[in-house]
Structure formats: structure tokens, C-alpha cells
Image (tube, rainbow, N blue to C red):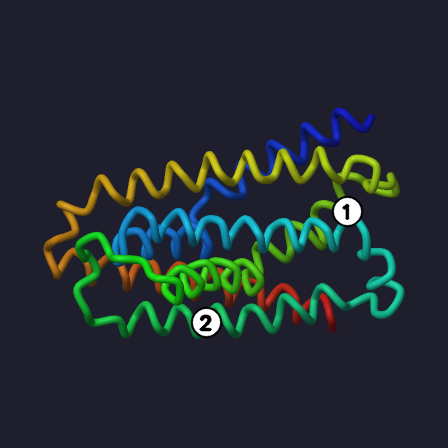
Amino acid sequence: MDVLTQIFTYSLTLALAAFLPGPGMTGLMFKTLSQGYWSGILMLLGLITGDIIFLSISIFFISYLTQLSSNFSAYIVIISCFYLLFIAYKFWMFNENLVQEQAVLDVNKTFSTYRDGLLITLSNPKTISFYLALVPAIFGLNSLQQYSLLLIIITVITLSIIGSLYIFFSWKIKKILKNIKIQRILLKSLSLMMSFLAVVMLYKEVILLN
């Protein structure tokens, strides 16, 4: 593939990966419902920052890290899977009212909301696999450093659009989710989905290591 085809493939794959519900977008929906629209925006910024960090690692450091250990990305994914199981447990045990009025953001709240988004992305095994395994597979041996700015712009725009759609959708379904029983069904469904993702990816990585 030529570089333009590879960049198009990257853009399309990123959009599909972001659109399919995962820990990041699920957490974004949860944050928007529980703390309001602006908290969702701040969390989205944190999510995007995490993606840019992993993209930068893939562009500038992946060959170096692979030389240190061929199983580097696998170890990171395994650690992240356990953290994802912890998040799934927190979702399952959540017993408060999910739908709150618009929260008033202060400096501490702003930072913690942004941090939540960043940490979810940095611990998301799906994101780690995408940037540390799939992106190198898409581009092969081509050096990405000269295209780094373009890839970052594409990533920011793509995630901003899809994240905004999730925020808008979450904001619109608040009336439906005022029923506590429906909230519990949603949270436990999301918890099961994240647990399933973590277990599947954990199994795959352990098998590969063996």
C-alpha cells in the first residue's frame, strides 16, 4: 500500500474502533449522564490526550520498545485488562442515581474529570492494541515521523466527532434513564460488556505469550 492508502485505512479503522462501544466511550457516556454535558466534554479531552500519547509512542518509540522486549505491548495489555475488570466491578456496584442535574465545575472537578478520561484511555486494552499492534501492522516498515502531525490531526478530529456524538446521545436519553431500574440494567450491561472484553483480550495475550 502507498502512504495515502495507509493513512486512509488508519482513519477508517480508527473511526470504526472509536464508534464501537468500548471502555472509553462507555465511560464518556457515564460521565455525561452523571455529571453533565461539560463534564463529558472535559472527559473527551482526556480520552483524546491518551490516544495522542499512544499514537506518539507508536510513531516515535515502538521500534525501540520492541527491541527491549518483543512482548512489551502484551504485558501492557495484560495489566490494562485487570484494571478494566476493576472498572467493570465499579460499574456493577454503582448504586447512586446515575442521572444528575448539570454539575458546577470548579478547578479540582475540572482536573479530575480530565484525568478520568486520560486514565481510561491509558488503561484501555483496546486502545493499546490499536496503537501498539494494529497501527504498526497498517503502516509496516514505513517511517511515520514525517506524517506525525497529519496523523495527530486526523486522530483529534475523528475522536472529537465520534465523542461528541456519544455526548449528544447521552444528553438526549437522560429522560429515559430517570427510571432507577433502567439505570441498573444499563450499568450492569456495560459492566458485563467491559468484563467480556477484558477476559477475551487477556486470554488472547496469555495464549500469545505461551
- Confirm or deny contact between disc 1 and disc 2 (CB under 8 A): no
Mark number, residue 136: 1
Mark number, residue 85: 2
Secondary structure of residue under mark 2: helix
Which residue occupies 42% across, 50% down? 25
Which residue occupies 73% across, 71% down? 209
In the rendered view, tell whether residue 21 sits above or below residue 207.
above
Tell me the crowding category of disc 2: few under 14, some 14 to 19, or many 20 or more residues within 10 angstroms, Cα based.
Answer: some
Q: Quadrant of the N terminus?
A: top right
Query: Does 127 sit left or right of 10 as displayed?
Result: left
Residue type indicated by callout 1: Pro
Residue 47 in picture, x, y percent from top left: 51, 53
Residue 196 in picture, x, y percent from top left: 45, 63
Q: Quadrant of the C terminus?
A: bottom right
In the rendered view, tell whether residue 193 sits above or below residue 15.
below
Secondary structure of residue under mark 1: helix
Report how many numbered discs are placed on residues in the image. Answer: 2
Residue 172 in picture, x, y percent from top left: 22, 39
